[in-house]
Each structure stands twice: as structure tokens, then as C-alpha cells.
């Protein structure tokens, strides 16, 4: 039996619905590729352009419906699960008296079928798409309200609306029913009657089994509601229009973005071409300039004749020519006088330039010397201030550490220095008045500085060393009367040396190191050096002798120490 005959035979059966698999001559486990091929064959055979009768048009619409259901995996699964019920058109639970007026999962199956709204999408027809499904969901919402407790405020579900409903309200309707869960008890799904139970154990068993059946029926109802919702969403003209507008908006934005990108790319390409053209022009200009430079470098010019020659041979031939020689002779005669004048002017200019350069160099050297001098003066003043601070700290420390014994020794040393100074003045009375006055002033300055140095040095010595030095001085003065005079001379030599050092330091500070020393100062310095040498030689000679062991000692203090330790005091 052919395909057309099979489809027509199915169409002639009144009271029965056509199976989608049989309509397209497919098996239940067919693939999507087989479904596409079968639909293509049926559509070519039953297309209204080739068949004008109404039955063929009805069959073509049925083929389209079958292809739509079977091409969607979700709808195909639902169709396979409820295929027998859809084809039979009989409600198996219709005989039940309990809850017979309420919508059941089996009642919702017929709404997953395009034949349930024969009026199509025309709102003027009675059973149109919007009216059928609007009434269905209103009825479900009313049943839910009846199941709620008395006194509870019921929240109305969003209305399905019609073709003129705003898209926001349409989305609200679908969002509400997507998460819908019924509150109905589904008592008609009970498997056993509790009245038939003979004891409590059977009653508990019956209730548990009935509870399971109710839960199963509740899940079926919720799933059936979602299946119906998904079915109408795919066919809702408002959703289709919204998706189409969204896609158009997305495509429009994509086109705008592509246009912007294209314009931006064109602008970038234009800038790149302009930059390349600019580089090319600069390169060509550079090449022309280089060619001109090379040409000028390779060109030989005769300035007398004002001619250019590209080769050296041509230039040599020109030099040997009569015309060149004649012009050279004429130029030499005409410029003999001017050459001398020009040479003199050039010489004067040259001398002026040399003098100017020498002056600039001299100014630079002077400036450098001044900068060095300023830096050295700054460092010198800085060091001077630092030394003053250090000396001040040393004096303060010396004053704090002095005890009564150190003060007595210091006063005695000052007295000895005054005696030595008086004797030195008597010995040097032969010098002139002017020299004596200058020496006295210098000696006073040296004496003050020496006392300061002595104070700082004595701070470091121990009191025992000071006592031994004092005994040594007294013993030496008592041993020989002439020794005091020698000590005074030694004192004078030391003062002169200190004075000379101070003079040298002052000369170096004032920057007069390169100046010549006066004759008086040279003579005075030589005399002081000689006296210092004599004092050193006298000091080196041993003057104290132990009569027992014949050992010689430089000081009497050491001799007494030797006598105490060795026991030679009786022999002496």
C-alpha cells in the first residue's frame, strides 16, 4: 500500500486520531534524519499547490503537525508516553465519581494538541488559541483556591491574555506557571478504601499506599501543567514576535557594531596609507638630497672661470687651456693690491680672535680658581669651628676632672714658668727694644697656649705621675744650683719652639706661605733652635752616681729609688 493511500485510509477513519508515526510511515525508534526524509516525501506529495481538494490540505496540515511534534525531543517524549490515550480519546478515569469535576493529568493531555483550539489564532473565532488556554489556566487556579484553607487570602495567577496583552504580562504568566505546584489532594487516586481495612495495621498500610499514589498523581499533574505551558509557549504568537524582535535587535546591533568596526578599520587603513605615503616621499626626498650631495662632492669647481667638472681629467685639461691661463693672469694683475689689503685685514681679525679666546680662557681659569678658593675657605672655616668646639669640650672635661692636687701642681708649674720667663728676659736684654717687645708679646701668647695645652695633658696623667714629676723637679733644683738655670733655658727653648709653631700656623692661615720671612725672625728662630739643641745635649748627660755599684742615673729620683731597692744607701 502506497504512502498516499495509507494517509488517505487513516483520514477516512472517523472517531480516531491519526498516529504521527503511521502518518509519516516511521517506526517508533526512528532517527531525526529519517523523520526529515519522511516529512519531505509526504510534503511533496500532499502540498496544496499539487492537490486542490480539502482532504489533501487537511492531511498536509496533519503532516506538518506530526513533523513539529516528532522533531522536538521533549514533545516527542511526551507524545510517546501518552500516545495510547491521545489516539483513543477516552479518559480512563472518567468512571470515577470522586473528584470527577476536577482537572486531572489525563485531562491536560488533550491540550497538548493543536486540534484543541480549532479557531486558530483569530480572536474573532470562538475557540481560538487565547480563549482555550486562558479558560484552562483560570479553571486550574480556581481549583487551587478551593483547596486552600478557609480564611487564607488567595493570590490570583496572572491571566493568559490575548493578542493585545503587553509582553511584560505575558512573561509574568509564564514565570508563574513554570514554578507552579498544585495543592490538591488527588483523593481519586487512592488504591484502597480505608473502610475495607479490618484492623489498625491494615488501615495504616492502606493510608501509606494511598499516600504514595496521591504523590505520584500530583507529580503527574504538575508535569502535565509544565508540558502544556511549554507547548503553548512554542506556539504563542506574542512570544514568537518577541523573539523575532529580539533577534532583529541583536542583528541590528551586530550590524551597527560591524559598521563601526569597518569604519574604524577603514580609518586605520587610511592613516596607514597616509603614513606610508609620507615615508615614501621623505625617502625619495632624502635620496634626491643624497644624490645632490654625492654629485657636489664628485664635482670639481674652477672658481676663476666659474665652471664645474665631473672628472679630474677634464679639470686638468681646463687648467692647461689658454683661456684659463689668460683669466688667471688677469685675475692676478687685478688683485695684487687687494690681496695685500685682504691679508692685512685677515691678520688683524685673526689676532683679535686669538686675544678674545685667550681672555675667555683666562676668565674661565680665574673663575675656577675663585671657586676652589671659596670651597677651601669654607672647609677651613668649618674645620676651625669644629676644632674650637672640640677644645671647648676638652676644657670643660678638664675642669670637671681636676682635683685639688692637680690644681696645686698646675699653680706650681705656672710659677716655674714665670721664673723661667723672667730669667729668659734678662738673658735676652742685649737685643733691641723693638725686638724685645715683639718677643714678649709672642712669648705671652705662646705661654697662654702652652698653659692650655698643659691643662689638657695633665688631665690624662695620673696623680701619682704628677707627684713623681714634682719630686723630681724639687730634687734636681736642690742637687745643683746651676740646674735651675738650665731648666729655665730649656723652658725658654720650649716657649720659643711653641711660638715659632704658632707663627707658622698663622702664616699658613693668612695665605702668606709664599712670602719671604723677615731677617729678624730668621735670626731669632736660628738662635732658639741652637738653644734647644744645647738643652737637649745637657739633658742627655748622666749626673747622678751610685758609689757602691757605680751605676749612673739621669735623675735624682731614679737614684733614690735604686738605693731603696738595692740597699746601697749605707755605702753612699
Image: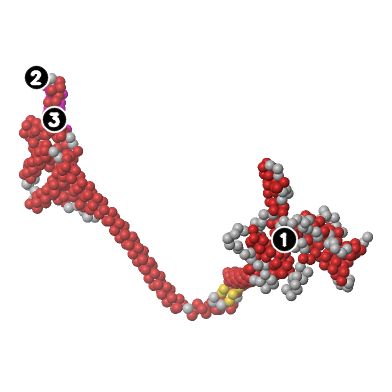
Alpha carbons under labels 1 and 3: distance apart: 149 Å
Q: Which residue is mark 2?
A: 570
Q: Residue at x 7, y 47 (%)?
A: 430
Q: Which mark is residue 555?
A: 3
In the displayed orientation, state which residue is furthest to the right. 1
Residue 464 lies in what quarter of the image? top left
* Residue that badge 1 annotates: 101
Taking the magenta stretch, the answer to whether it contains residue 423 is no
- Residue occupying the point 11% across, 34% down: 470
557 to the left or right of 14: left
Q: Which span of residues is magenta-colored?
A: 540-558
Looking at the rendered image, the disc whose residue lies closer to the viewer, 1 or 3, is: 1
The answer to which of marks 3 and 2 sits earlier in the sequence is 3
- Of label 1 and label 3, which has the lower sequence position? 1
Is residue 552 magenta-colored? yes
Is residue 450 shown above or below 316? above
Considering the numbered disc 3 on the image, is that residue within a helix, a strand or a loop? loop
Nearer to us in this view, 453 or 187: 187
x%, y% of residue 163? 69, 72
Residue 515 pos. (x, y %): 22, 54
Q: Which residue shows up at 68% across the image and 62% down it?
A: 140
Element carrying mark 2: loop
Residue 485 makes an appearance in the image: yes
* Mark pair 1, 2: CA separation: 158 Å
Amino acid at each position: 500500500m502506497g504512502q498516499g493511500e495509507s494517509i488517505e485510509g487513516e483520514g477516512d477513519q472517523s472517531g480516531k486520531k491519526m498516529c504521527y508515526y503511521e502518518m509519516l510511515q516511521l517506526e517508533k525508534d526512528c532517527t531525526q534524519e529519517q523523520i526529515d526524509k519522511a516529512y519531505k516525501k509526504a510534503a511533496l506529495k500532499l502540498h496544496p499547490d499539487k492537490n486542490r481538494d480539502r482532504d489533501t490540505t487537511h492531511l498536509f496540515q496533519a503532516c506538518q503537525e506530526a513533523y513539529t511534534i516528532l522533531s522536538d525531543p521533549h514533545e516527542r517524549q511526551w507524545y510517546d508516553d501518552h500516545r495510547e490515550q491521545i489516539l483513543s480519546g477516552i479518559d480512563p478515569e472518567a468512571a470515577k465519581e470522586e473528584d470527577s469535576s476536577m482537572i486531572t493529568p489525563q485531562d491536560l493531555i488533550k491540550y497538548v494538541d493543536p486540534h484543541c483550539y480549532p479557531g486558530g489564532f483569530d480572536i474573532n473565532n470562538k475557540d481560538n488559541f487565547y480563549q482555550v488556554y486562558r479558560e484552562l489556566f483560570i479553571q486550574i487556579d480556581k481549583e487551587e483556591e478551593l483547596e486552600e484553607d478557609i480564611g487564607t487570602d488567595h493570590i490570583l495567577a496572572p491571566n493568559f491574555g490575548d493578542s493585545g496583552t503587553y509582553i511584560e504580562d505575558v512573561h509574568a504568566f509564564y514565570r508563574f506557571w513554570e514554578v507552579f505546584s498544585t495543592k490538591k489532594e488527588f483523593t481519586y487516586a487512592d488504591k484502597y478504601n480505608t473502610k475495607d481495612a479490618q484492623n489498625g495495621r491494615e488501615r495504616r498500610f492502606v493510608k501509606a499506599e494511598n499516600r504514595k499514589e496521591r504523590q505520584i498523581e500530583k507529580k503527574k499533574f504538575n508535569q502535565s501543567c509544565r508540558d502544556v505551558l511549554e507547548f503553548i509557549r512554542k506556539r504563542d504568537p506574542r512570544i514568537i514576535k518577541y523573539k523575532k524582535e529580539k533577534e532583529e535587535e541583536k542583528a541590528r546591533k551586530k550590524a551597527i557594531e560591524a559598521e563601526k568596526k569597518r569604519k574604524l578599520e577603514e580609518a586605520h587603513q587610511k592613516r596607514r596609507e597616509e603614513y606610508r605615503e609620507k615615508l615614501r616621499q621623505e625617502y625619495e626626498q632624502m635620496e634626491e638630497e643624497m644624490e645632490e650631495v654625492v654629485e657636489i662632492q664628485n664635482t670639481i669647481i674652477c672658481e676663476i672661470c666659474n665652471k664645474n667638472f665631473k672628472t679630474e681629467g677634464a679639470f686638468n685639461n681646463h687648467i692647461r687651456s689658454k683661456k684659463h691661463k689668460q683669466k688667471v693672469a688677469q685675475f692676478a694683475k687685478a688683485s695684487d693690491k687687494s690681496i695685500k689689503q685682504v691679508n692685512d685685514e685677515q691678520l688683524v681679525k685673526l689676532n683679535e680672535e686669538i686675544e678674545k679666546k685667550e681672555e675667555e680662557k683666562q676668565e674661565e681659569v680665574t673663575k675656577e680658581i675663585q671657586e676652589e678658593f671659596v670651597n677651601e675657605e669654607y672647609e677651613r672655616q668649618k674645620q676651625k669651628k669644629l676644632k674650637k668646639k672640640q677644645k671647648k669640650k676638652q676644657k670643660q672635661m678638664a675642669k670637671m676632672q681636676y682635683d685639688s692636687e692637680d690644681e696645686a701642681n698646675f699653680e706650681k708649674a705656672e710659677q716655674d714658668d714665670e721664673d723661667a720667663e723672667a730669667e729668659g728676659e734678662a738673658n735676652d736684654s742685649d737685643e733691641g727694644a723693638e725686638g724685645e717687645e715683639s718677643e714678649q708679646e709672642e712669648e705671652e701668647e705662646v705661654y697662654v697656649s702652652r698653659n692650655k695645652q698643659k691643662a689638657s695633658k695633665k688631665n690624662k696623667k695620673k696623680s701619682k705621675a704628677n707627684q713623681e714629676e714634682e719630686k723630681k723637679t724639687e730634687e734636681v733644683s736642690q742637687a745643683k744650683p746651676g740646674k735651675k738655670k738650665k731648666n729655665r733655658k730649656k723652658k725658654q727653648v720650649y716657649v720659643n719652639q711653641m711660638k715659632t709653631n704658632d707663627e707658622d700656623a698663622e702664616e699658613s692661615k693668612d695665605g702668606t706661605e709664599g712670602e719671604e720671612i723677615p731677617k729678624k725672625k730668621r735670626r731669632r728662630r736660628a738662635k732658639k733652635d741652637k738653644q734647644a739643641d744645647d738643652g737637649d745635649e745637657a739633658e742627655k748627660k748622666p749626673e747622678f752616681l751610685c758609689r757602691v755599684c757605680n751605676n749612673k742615673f739621669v735623675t735624682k729620683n731614679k737614684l733614690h729609688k735604686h738605693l731603696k731597692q738595692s740597699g746601697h744607701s749605707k755605702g753612699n
